[in-house]
Image (spheres, rainbow, N blue to C red):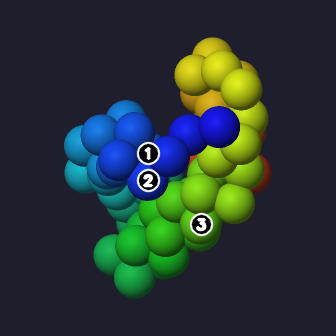
Amino acid sequence: MMDTALFKNTWLPLESTFYKVALYILEDEADARDAVQDLYIKLWNRRNIDSNYKMWVLARQVITNSLF
């Protein structure tokens, strides 16, 4: 299970990257912020996944589903 500190250290540094990708695809700042917020909520709710690889797969799925 991922604790709060590990979650922050792993995922928060990527926020600007996620936002840039979302903005590029959605072409709207508000929609891009919403997509990134949704991503972080879903990642937090599933933080009990037992490996970083599975978290990355989940992140990819959430991003893909949110943006397309």
Choose mark 2 or mark 1, whichever is in front.
2
Check whether the beta carbons of the residues at disc 2 and disc 1 lie within 8 A of each other. yes
- Locate residue 41 relative to residue 46 in the image: left or right: left
Q: Is residue 59 above or below residue 29?
A: above
The residue under label 2 is which amino acid type?
A: Thr
Q: Secondary structure at mark 3?
A: helix
Identity of the amino acid at label 1? Phe
Q: Based on the displayed image, in which of its 4 quarters is residue 32 positioned?
A: bottom left
Q: Position of residue 18 (x, y in %)?
A: 39, 48
**Can you identify the residue that label 2 sits on?**
4
- In the figure, is residue 13 to the left or right of 62? left
Q: Which residue is mark 1?
A: 7
Question: 5 or 63: nearer the eye?
Answer: 5
Image height of 35 relative to 44, above or below: below
Q: Please, is residue 29 above or below residue 44 in the view?
A: below
Q: Secondary structure at mark 2?
A: helix
Disc 3: which residue = 41
Q: At 64% from the left edge and 46% from the top edge, which residue is drawn? A: 47
What x and y, as percent, mark residue 64? Answer: 67, 44
With 58 as the anchor, is 24 left or right in this view? left
The x and y percentages for residue 60 are: 63, 34
